[in-house]
Structure formats: structure tokens, C-alpha cells
Amino acid sequence: MNLREKYDIPSDAVITIAGTVGVGKSTMTKALADALQFRTSFEKVDTNPYLDLFYDDFEKWSFHLQIYFLAERFKEQKRMFEYGGGFIQDRSIYEDTGIFAKMHQEKGTMNDVDYETYTNLFEAMVMTPYFPHPDLLIYLEGSLDDILGRIQERGRAMEQQTPVDYWVEMHERYETWINNFNGCPVLRLNISDYDLMNDPDCAERLVERIGSFIQQTSVLKR
């Protein structure tokens, strides 16, 4: 019996991993996919035609970038459910509007008209009973010091050059977003409570917790 069957996790489940930069979304995605024998869904950055343009001129290209992300994530969400589920997804469609588009609007790098157009489109596409929402969103959280430590440890050049104030702001925005999120059931995991890199039994404990949470939320829906 594999871990998915042992802890009664549906074979067609779609589980999304969310959280700010540095919390280990990709590591969690891979670990859970391996443990559950699920497929993975990662963001396709290399084929994004707006990313470089956006970094050159935030105000000109923020709306285009957000619309592109919305379309691509929407298609990917449909693909996973049409395939029959059994996916772990790195980053959710909800973060784009709840965090990044909102941040652009508040900072003036997306004008109010574009922001309203974007949010109206998002709500028409995503916030409806017809959109295939994930069965579970796992939110990875941690103290600001722990997250900054991880960003420093992995040593990515662009992240090292980013002012600390930006990471502080993102940490606050993510906490505000998740505290008001109701698109699907949410399981919050603190990054200080597990160690996927060094603890061989960690993945199974997480799967057990996920299975228990899914069963509880399933009962509540009845």
C-alpha cells in the first residue's frame, strides 16, 4: 500500500502549494508528488514573453504580464482537472490577483482602470462555481527571519540584490492575503516544523497530516 492509499488521499486530488519567496514551495511540491505518486505542475517562466519587458518598464507592462499569468494559470488549472487530477501545483492562481496585481495598483505601476479590468476578468473566470478550484491549498508560512535566512542560504543573485524591505513587504502581503482567502480549504504548515531535506520520515508525516485534513474538510462539506 502506498502513502496515498494509506492515508486515504483521493487519487484525483489537486493540491496547490502557496507562500512567499523562500518558503520552499518547489521542494514541497516535489516531495509530495513523489510521496503520493502524483504529477507536478510548475510555473513556466522561460516561455513568458512579457517578463523581460516588465522588468524594464513596470508601468507599461504590469497589466500585460498579469493577464498573461491569468490566462496561463487558468489553462493549467483546467488541464489538471481534465487529466483527472493527481497533481501537486507550485503556486496558485489566486496569488496573482490577491498579492501581485494589488501591489502594482497600490504602488502606481498599474493604473486603476487596468486594475479594475484585470480583477473583473479574474472574478469572471475564477471566482465562479464552474472553475475547478483545488481540493486543498497548502500555505507554507514562517517567521520573517526564517524566510530571510533561507533566501540568503540559497544564494540566488537576483534575490541577493533585492532590498530586504521588499521581502518584508511580501511577507506582510502574503499573511494578509491568506488570512482573508476562502477559495478552497487551506492547510497552514510552518516551515520550522518540518525538514524535507534532512528528515527521511518527514514526507510521510506531512502526507498523514494532509490526509487527515482532507477527511475533516470532506466531512464538513456533507
Image (cartoon, rainbow, N blue to C red):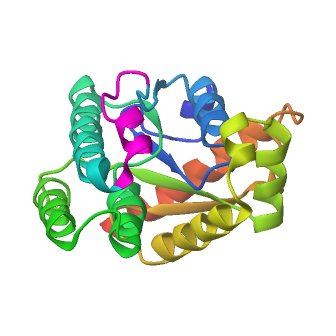
Residue 181 appearing in the image: no
Residue 12 position within the rendered picture, expressed as x and y whole percent measured from the top left: 36, 33
Quarter the C terminus occupies: bottom left
Q: Nearer the viewer, residue 16 or 48?
A: 48
Residue sitting at the far front: 56
Q: Is residue 133 left or right of residue 128?
A: right
Residue 80 appearing in the image: yes
The residue that appears at 44% across and 52% down in the rendered structure is 136
Quarter the N terminus occupies: top right
Residue 198 position within the rendered picture, expressed as x and y whole percent measured from the top left: 89, 34
Highlighted magenta segment, given as a residue range: 46-58
Q: Nearer the viewer, residue 119 or 86?
A: 119
Residue 21 position within the rendered picture, expressed as x and y whole percent measured from the top left: 62, 50
Q: Is residue 126 left or right of residue 137?
A: left
Q: Nearer the viewer, residue 3 or 134?
A: 134
The correct choice, above or below, for 28 with respect to 36 in the image is below
The residue that appears at 25% across and 34% down in the rendered structure is 81
The residue that appears at 54% across and 22% down in the rendered structure is 37
**Residue 54 inside the magenta-drawn segment:** yes
Q: Nearer the viewer, residue 165 or 102?
A: 165
Residue 71 position within the rendered picture, expressed as x and y whole percent measured from the top left: 21, 40
Q: Quadrant of residue 175?
A: bottom right
**Residue 222 inside the magenta-drawn segment:** no
